[in-house]
Amino acid sequence: MTTTFTKKDLTIADQQRLQTLEQHIELARDYFLGYPVSKDFDFSEINHFLNFPINNIGDPYEQGSTYRVQTHELEREVIRFFAKLFRANPQDYWGYVTNGSSESNLYGLYLAREMYPKGMVYYSGSTHYSVRKNIHLLNIPSIVIRSQDNGEIDYEDFENTVRMNRHKPAIVLATFGTTMHEAKDDVTRLKGILKKLAIQDHYIHCDGALAGTFGAFIEPRLPFDFKDGADSISISGHKFVGSPIPCGVIVTKKSNRDRIAKGISYIGSLDTTITGSRNGHSPLFLWYGLKKMGEEGLRARYLYSLDIARYCENKLKEAGITAWRNPEAITVVLPKTTESIKQKWQLATEGDMSHIICMPNVTRAQIDEFVEDIVNSEEEAEEEFEFEF
């Protein structure tokens, strides 16, 4: 007996809803400067893979999985690309493609907790909100370290705080590119403080969601990778490389991962990831994007973004607007804008400041239009004030 499924066409009303949604998303895509998302990708050449139920269940490095509709081979190539970029030991690295940096950070903290169940987590006040949530989920004790004015961790406060808790293993969450300022914590300096205090049991996870992707190309070089002292590094895939599906990457030491690996017989693989079933399309998109641009293409994207960031900072200053950047950052910080500007350009705003992130798809023409909007809004505000007076 066979089962026949009938196909039902969408109603005209539903078709119109989809058309309206597409128009809304297209307009929103064309006017956002405040969030680190690349939109200059073209995956039309591989769109047909969306016709397959690709599921990267299990460990991407395990052979013999009974579910074969997967992209594990391409996933391993993506991990190898970033492991090389992060100067990982070629004989001791492992990783997988996650749902995003939040999951990647969770994995790094999970490994650290399994290694040091009695450890204390240290992270700065500028750390991404997902870290606080992950620490809560993992039920690890933690201490928040002060941030400097530029968003970087306060190393003096870190040293003093760790000294008071030197009897406990230290789990350090370093941020390489904070959310609002794109400040970068110095992993070598943090590692040096732990050595100075003779804390042998420690683990450093580096959250490099945005800047970690181009960290190897920053000059002068800033310490953040495995050779600098990191034990694991996380990045986002949809931010600087670009992907229609949010995704991330976690790279860690295989020797550390082996501590938590458990075999699952019915899938024929190890249980080493946070989720069971995993998106198998994201590794495909990342692989395709990295193959098309390569390491030099990735460097060129950063240099372009850096040039746009300099242009943006200068244009704002020329217009009398206080703007600044951390060294070699593509994020430009400026005073909080009016609500209309914030909504039109979808600016991330915290307290009395907003920011623009000059991703590879941002153009000088967009910056010009943005600055003009701010100038006009300030002039209108002045006119209203004069009228009220």
Image: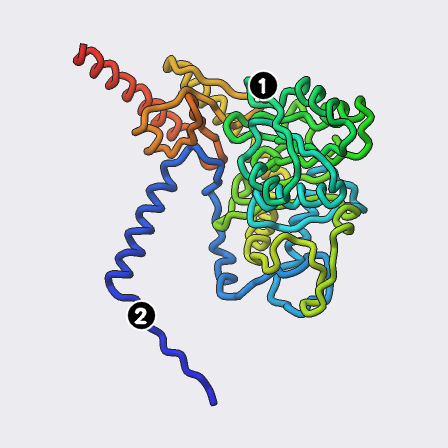
Is residue 216 visible in the rendered image? The answer is no
Q: Name the residue rendered at 31%, 46% in the picture.
A: 24
| Residue 305 higher or lower than 21, as above or below | above
Is residue 105 visible in the rendered image? The answer is yes
Q: Looking at the image, which residue sits at the far bottom?
A: 1
Q: Name the residue rendered at 58%, 25% in the picture.
A: 183
Q: State the mark number for residue 148.
A: 1
The residue at which mark 2 appears reads as 9
| Residue 84 higher or lower than 123, as above or below | below
| Residue 68 higher or lower than 349, as above or below | below
| Residue type pointed to by label 1 | Gln
Mark 2 or mark 1, which has the lower sequence index?
Answer: 2
Residue in the foreground of this view, choosing between 293 and 34: 34
| Residue type pointed to by label 2 | Asp
Residue 365 point in image, percent of width and height: 38, 29
- Number of dots carrying numbers: 2
- In the figure, residue 72 lies in which quadrant? bottom right
Residue 223 point in image, percent of width and height: 70, 27
The answer to whether residue 245 is left or right of residue 73 is left
Residue 50 point in image, percent of width and height: 49, 61
Q: Name the residue rendered at 62%, 25% in the picture.
A: 145
Tell me the quadrant of the picture where the C terminus can be found.
top left
The answer to whether residue 344 is left or right of residue 104 is left
- In the figure, residue 71 lies in which quadrant? bottom right
Marks 2 and 1, how far apart in space?
Answer: 58 Å
Residue in the foreground of this view, choosing between 369 and 345: 345
Q: Name the residue rendered at 68%, 31% in the picture.
A: 224
